[in-house]
Amino acid sequence: MRKTLLLVLLAILLIGALTFTVVAQNTPSIAVKDQVSDGSVVIDSVTSDGPGWVVVRGVSGGGRPGPVLGETAVGAGTTDNVRVVLNLDLATPQLFAALHKDDTNVGTWDFGAASGADAPVSVDGNPVQQLFKAYVIQMADQPVADDNTVVADTVVMDGPGWLVIHADNGGKPGPVLGHTAVHAGRNANVSVEISADGRTDSLWPMLHEDTGTVGTYEFGTVDGADLPVTQNGQVAMFQIWTVPHIRAVDQAVGKDDAGNPTVLIQSVLSKGPGFIVIHSDNNGQPGPVLGFAPLTDGVNTDVTVTLDQGTPGAVVWPMLHEDTGTVGTYEFGTVNGADLPVKDANGQIVMLSINLTGTGDQGTAGGAEATTQATASTEATAEVPAATPAATESAAGGTDTTGPCTVVARVEQGANIRSAPSMDAAIVSTLSGGQNRRPIGQTMLDANGFRWFQLSGNTWVRTDVVTATGACGTLPVASAEATPEATAGA
């Protein structure tokens, strides 16, 4: 009898301990670091005990949460690296990240629209929220204006500073071409006149402090004055292009009203009217046309392309074309010399490849979480030295050396895709077990003894968490110090 009672008591204690563990793991919480933003922020981790919302708010004059700037839905449990796109019209240098319920129409943000809906979450009477700082540069690709200026849509600083435009130097910031003072808080339509001498096709806007003589730019002339702004080791800078350029990310296939598949192109800079044309993949090269959409002169944002001329596979190729025949009518291949592909200064076609999910081919899916901006394939390999056979064969680690190089996430663990070839770099997406990608380069051993494969969009995966097959021995060697296009939280 005593033995039976003892066993019952032990069972009760065990069940209680397990219940406590589950409850503790799902205790609502939120964690976010100070960061650099291009119009969105990344919340490091959020735990919700049910469907919820990660909400970012400005700071009111009394230091309390102010207007809602953006929200992203999350499920129950813990979610890492939650990106929230911001409305910057009311942005402040400090922001609140908060957890709200999703308790009315799940998936629909009803806070403020319905009484008591999607209210803030509290634990022991305290709201689940955290104050953090975000320095913002929101600046689109753009041609240099006739008066030699470029314009940032929004700059947010927590004190006086400078918006400095650097030339490009091999994929990194080079010499200063111009600068403009900015004040604390939100600055709109910040114009910077840049020098024609030393100007490059891509530019690096960068935020600097104003710590010397206020109103006098002294970086480089006064020791320690007007240094670049950094947050958690990330310099407040981004790369933009002043020549035709495409920005697109790996994504899930969309659908239009007729049920046709669609692809979203984040932005295209076109010189004159043009077309963004989506090609299928043909063994690592552009294949037949799947669909196209017209472009206007200048920057075109959030361009949806309907793929009504074929079925997309797991990889597609957005390509920029002119509109030189009948304006608004795509005539390439039907009218001699009309609507030709656009080429850059090196004679390379302006194009890139992106990975799609929801195509029926789950072997090469990149995932909608891939947020690092993709660049043209010619840019991804520019100025990369030729590989040595010993280095590439050692990094590849595969046995099949025929066909295109392909890396497959190991089923038992998957693989994190990072914004730079470093364990300290942000995770921008995850390659699930069995999914694969086609690398475009690889590093030599880094300081920690790891090698990394370079993927499209200047993202990276460590070689020891994937299995490589194909001609990986021919991949060019990329520098382990390569600087990715900066994205918020990445």
Image (cartoon, grey):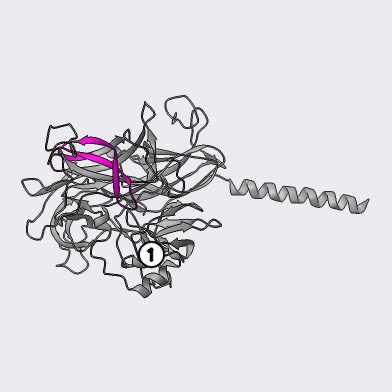
The region drawn magenta spans 271-300
Local secondary structure at mark 1: helix
Q: Residue at x 56, y 57 (%)?
A: 412
Q: Please provide percent x and percent y for residue 226.
A: 20, 61
Question: What residue is shown with label 1?
Answer: 472
Q: Residue 421 is drawn in which quadrant?
A: bottom left
Would you say residue 221 is visible in this rendering? yes
Q: Magenta region's main secondary structure?
A: strand
Asked if the stretch drawn in magenta spans residue 292, the answer is yes
In the displayed image of the protein, which residue is found farthest to the right? 1
Q: Residue 62 is drawn in which quadrant?
A: top left
Judge by depth and name the residue closer to the eye, 273 or 88. Answer: 273
Left or right, 40 with respect to 28, comes to left
Judge by depth and name the residue closer to the eye, 73 or 299. Answer: 299
Residue 311 higher or lower than 218, as above or below = above
Judge by depth and name the residue closer to the eye, 330 or 437. Answer: 330
Q: Residue at x 47, y 24 (%)?
A: 115
Would you say residue 38 is visible in this rendering? no
Left or right, 20 with respect to 424, comes to right
Q: Please provide percent x and percent y for residue 230.
A: 30, 59
Asked if the stretch drawn in magenta spans residue 114, the answer is no
In the displayed image of the protein, which residue is found farthest to the bottom? 390
Q: Please provide percent x and percent y for residue 8.
A: 84, 49
Q: Residue at x 16, y 52 (%)?
A: 344
Q: Amino acid at mark 1?
A: Cys
Residue 489 higher or lower than 479, as above or below = above
Quarter of the image that includes the C terminus: bottom left
